[in-house]
Image (spheres, grey):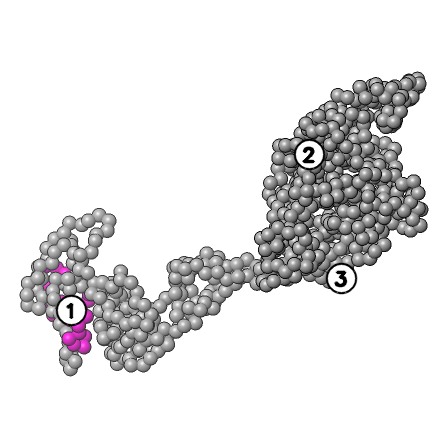
Amino acid sequence: MAGVKEGQGQLVFGLDIGTRSIVGTVGYLNSSKFHVLAQCAREHETRAMLDGQIHDIVKVGQTIQAVKEQLEEDLGRELTEVCIAAAGRVLRTVTTHAEQEFEEDHEVTEEDVYSLSTLGIEQAYEEFQGSNDLDMKFYCVGYTCMRYYMNGYQIGNLVGHKVRVMAVDLIATFLPEDVVDGLYKAVELVGLHVANMTLEPIAAIQVAIPEKFRMLNMALVDVGAGTSDISITKEGTITAYGMIPVAGDSLTDILVQHCLVDFDTAERIKQQAGSRESVEYQDIMGLTQTITAREVEEVLAEKVQEMASMVAECIRELNGDKAVSAVFVVGGGGMVPGYTQMLASELGVLKERVAIRGQEVMQNIQFEIENPRRDSMMVTPIGICLSYYEQSNNFIFVEFNGKRVKLYDNGKLSVADAALQCSFPNEELFPRRGQALTFQVNGKSRMVRGQQGEAAVIRVNGQTADIYAQIHNGDHIEVLSSTAGEAASLELGKLGELSQRLQVVVNGVKIDLPKTASVNGVLENEFYTIREGDQIQIQNFYTVEEIAEFMDVPLGGKILVNDTPAMPGTRVYENFTLDWDVQEEPSYEELEEEDYSMEERTGTADRPEPEEGTTGKPEPEEGPADRPGTGEESPSSSLPVMVNGDTVILTGKADYIFVDIFSFIEFDLRDPAGRDIVTKLNGRPAGYMESLKAGDVIEIYWKNRNENM
């Protein structure tokens, strides 16, 4: 049936799969008239359907097969595609507003309107999924575009207009997956593919209430065997749909009990009582019985009243808690005596305004067959055919990694849509990176991404494809999961900070020193492999001793850092100058105090490290009396000593060492007055860490440039 929309004369096969019977209609649309070429109806041999839902797929399929074969015989051609309609006790509707904007004025085409409707359906589905409180999966089985808008203003038809923004108010209907699946499987059993699916009340209203009547606030009630389907019109559009699971079969069940007969016999009694004064039948005992039409009406009256009350209540609910102006009734269940009168009474409208509609609404239906059936039973089957031209919302089935998947066909389905429906992990479609490596450099977080893996291998019907490849009904899709790449790895020497060099001037020569780093407090070489969570500190200094080792030259005496006396452990930063006397070996005392850094000696250990590119001078250390104590305090004592001929009293400590003298005398280490400092204790060279005792004679002064020790 492909191409039916493009060419006049192409046939549409509509199948009304009802609770009690299956009715097939084949025809085509020519201008405003639908031409019926064949009709066929078959009742189910058993109760294979209840309340609009298939219970025995095989038996329903057998009845469909009988209808299909009869129609094919009448037409002289094979039927491969079919349009169907769904009913069911759990119907949900969503009303939504969808917009599409263009960058400049755009002339709207029919394809644009279709895309807008599809956008509305997808939006309604998302809204429904967000509010669905039932533990079951639903599918959209029909929709109606209520109103169109052009640049914010309501308009009847968008096609041909130039717009910047077009919009639609749309009502979409949803039924559970098992209802939809049952219908699809039943028709597939007989080799039919679903070309379109709609909702039964949507189909019925196509015929029963023409557009020219939809300005009125009316209701259509399609009373079938298992369900009563309801739709409401107002202001030129369909505004609501509803469904209740009470219809003709509930009346037949009462006659089964009253007459003691099987269901088929009771159904015959119900139908014949509408046109005869009495009906003869045999009960389960084999006895011949007779029941009058009047008795049938009395037996069913209470249930008919209940049906009418439930339908009236649903109509009011769908219509904003008020009655409609008129009601059209279609379907075999609505022909039971007294039903329309009771419905009118329940709604509070004149009985003439609730009427069964059949041949009266088929003015645009041209029957090309002899003795056609024109009653209310044919309204829905013909409407199913007409719905094909109004909307296309069928589903397709594909096989995804061996699993059968059903997808709503929006005309642009891809492998990604099938993967999503199958809950295939999204990350397994795309190349995956290996585990990232995170660590810190100078207190700031750093991350290195893992290697990129291989993309998923996708085949559609055996041919290589990608996730964007379009798919169609019956396609076989194979997806081999993507792979993860190697985990991130980085050597310490690859850090950008370590690619920079530290420049210092040693004995007048500019030296480039490679930067080093400690990891978790331990100095590591450039080949160290960084681990997750490592704390890396870039060292932006060298000690005097480390510079000498790097240059592979002996460290001489008289060390100066930025022209300030220093020790082997003194730190040297970017752009600092370092000088020592390469001809003179360090004194015994200097070697002895090699580990006593200039920072400790001059009080610079706690000050911030200089920024790169700056110069500075070591600061003198705070005196012992100025340092806060740690642990238990020792008793302090006074110690008198002679310093450069003057008596100096040392206080604040229990014991004293030579370096403590600098806290009690005026001696500026930051302003050199000579080449080096001379320190003597009792006439001999003194070490900074030597202990002092009362009466010691101390000499401290700057050595002149030309003076020899």
Decide which of tag 3 and tag 2 comes sooner along the chain: 2
Residue 319: give its label.
none
Query: Which residue lies under the disc numbered 2?
Result: 325
Q: Position of residue 158 (x, y in %)?
A: 66, 55
Which region of the structure is painted magenta?
A: 670-697
Q: CA distance from mark 3 to mark 2?
A: 59 Å
Query: What type is the residue that disc 2 sits on?
Result: Ser
Query: What type is the residue that disc 1 sits on?
Result: Asp
Q: Is residue 455 something one can see in this rendering?
A: no
Q: Nearer the viewer, mark 3 or mark 1?
A: 3
Query: Which residue lies under the disc numbered 1?
Result: 668
Q: Nearer the viewer, residue 244 or 514?
A: 244
Classify residue 429 as left or right of residue 571: right
Residue at 65% from the left image edge and 61% from the top image edge: 107
Q: Nearer the viewer, mark 1 or mark 2?
A: 2
Q: Residues within 10 Å of mark 2 (few under 14, many from 20)?
A: some
Q: CA distance from mark 1 to mark 2?
A: 108 Å
Q: Nearer the viewer, residue 348 or 90?
A: 348
